[in-house]
Amino acid sequence: MGVMDKGRYLAAMIKKHGIRGLVIKTVERRKDLEECLYRMAWHIKLVSEEQWKIQRNTTFDEMPMISVAVAAYETPEPFLEALIASLQRQSYQNWQLCIADGSMTDRVAHVAERYQGRDSRICYRRLEKNGGISENMNAAAAMAEGSFVGFLDHDDMLAADALYEVVRMINSHMDCDVIYTDEDKVNAEGNRHFCAHRKLDFNQELLRHYNYICHFLVVRRSVFEQTGGFRKEYDGSQDYDLLLRLTEQKKRFYHIDKILYHWRVHPGSTAGNALHKDYAYAAGRRALEDYVKRNQIPAQVQEIRGEQSYGLRYELKGQTLTVADYQHSMENMKELMKDISTEYVLLYDGSKLKEPSEKQQQELLRYTTTGEYGMVGARLALGRRLVSAGLLVDEIGWTVYQFGWMPAYFKGPFNRAVIPQNVLALPLDCFLIRCDLWRQMEDLWTEGYNLDIALKVGDRVRQAGYEVVLDAELTIKYKGRSYERCVYYRM
């Protein structure tokens, strides 16, 4: 990148993030130990030759054909060859590659027809005209013969065990409609991997703020066809529009917790071109606004500067709320609840926290407007350190604080520390909950709360048909400077 290009790039980044935001973004990236380790050791995560051979000889109860749809347009020959090679290296062999070519030249045809002649699983179609990404991708999906169709950008690649893991998930969950995987980015030469995106399991509220699902996306073909495929008016974020419509139909989503998709970064890609990102962002906002309108969700979609995500501000609808300080005493809790007649109660431990302000109370209460969320919480911080952004269970089964002890101004990987999302549970130092739900949990009102009890509360909320949500745009602070907590930093 030349001096002039670097200058233009810096100016664009300052315009997008602001000077302070850009400084924070730069510092956070440099302190991201997990990302540094991934850049150095990404190859360790690849399937080994021994594992590949075992997978190659595995027979599942169901061995569905997976059709991979690609919309090609003037794809550079090395990129298309790498894409095809990544399919031919798959340990699961029952696949079909469907290439719909909207190019004006024969660049793609020369490569695709050559490979098609050698491998009958490769299907190529030259389109009469370039209809744009949505129409071209629909044309590729129309060629599919498999019961599931996966979507691959024309310059990206799949890990060698991608389709094996997809089929393994299908056999584990025969009711699945949508499957998605983790992903990373790869440079133009294909020899440097970075920006590992380890995603959450299906998370409705997070999806309402940005398309965290992205790649590799696999959809049951009958479901894709019933949904109507991609829509041209959302070109640039056509996959986000599709995902939002799939959630409306209550389709079953499953997440494969493994990096199986490699998103190539180069000047012409969405991942590497700021103009393309702005175009995609605008299309995504339109998709979200239309989703909100279709579903009559009482909310306004707002732009968030520099985040590549959207704000969704729910409107208050006259919900009634009582704010109560239980002073870390369950006896106080029992007495308080006797006198509360409102729909919701905001409980906080006054021995540790100041009473949430009127504005904070209202912001938490907004999330109850849709009726989906039975329990709402905010980020909790001590001084300049974040204590909690919700709770999760780690790899060894411990209940821990998400992003615990991270600098409060850090945004976390893919901004997840500052974007509202569904969470497993919330610390019980401060939370808003439906009164009828909370009264049903009196057996959990013990002398002192710990994280396991908080986890049980979250489970009870979901069993009652509601979700737990974190308003990560709101931070409530502990009193004092030395409140000690056992915290665990988790990416």
Image (cartoon, rainbow, N blue to C red):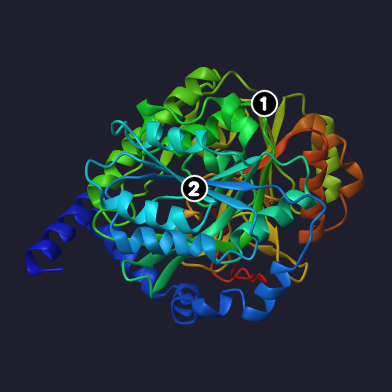
Q: Are marks 2 and 1 in contact (CB under 8 Å)?
A: no
Q: Residue 435 placed where, x, y %?
A: 77, 31
Q: Is residue 364 above or below residue 268?
A: above
- Mark 2 nearby-residue class (10 Å; few <14, some 14–19, many ≥20): many
Q: Is residue 406 left or right of residue 324?
A: left
Q: Quadrant of residue 341?
A: top right
Identity of the residue furthest to the front in this view: 117
Q: How many marks?
A: 2
SS type, badge 1: loop
Q: Is residue 299 left or right of residue 490?
A: left
Task: Please indicate, yes or no, whether residue 221 appears anywhere in the rendered image.
Answer: yes
Give me the C-alpha separation between circle 2 and circle 1: 20 Å
- What residue did someone put label 2 on? 419
Q: Is residue 191 above or below residue 418?
A: below
Amino acid type, label 1 = Gly
Residue at 85 percent across and 35 percent down: it is: 439
Amino acid type, label 2 = Ile
* Quarter placement of the C terminus: bottom right
- What residue did someone put label 1 on? 371
Residue at 24 percent across and 53 percent down: it is: 18
Q: Residue 181 placed where, x, y %?
A: 58, 55
Q: Tag 1 or tag 2, which sits nearer the N-term?
A: 1
SS type, badge 2: loop
Q: Residue 427 placed where, x, y %?
A: 69, 54
The answer to which of 435 and 184 lies nearer the viewer is 184
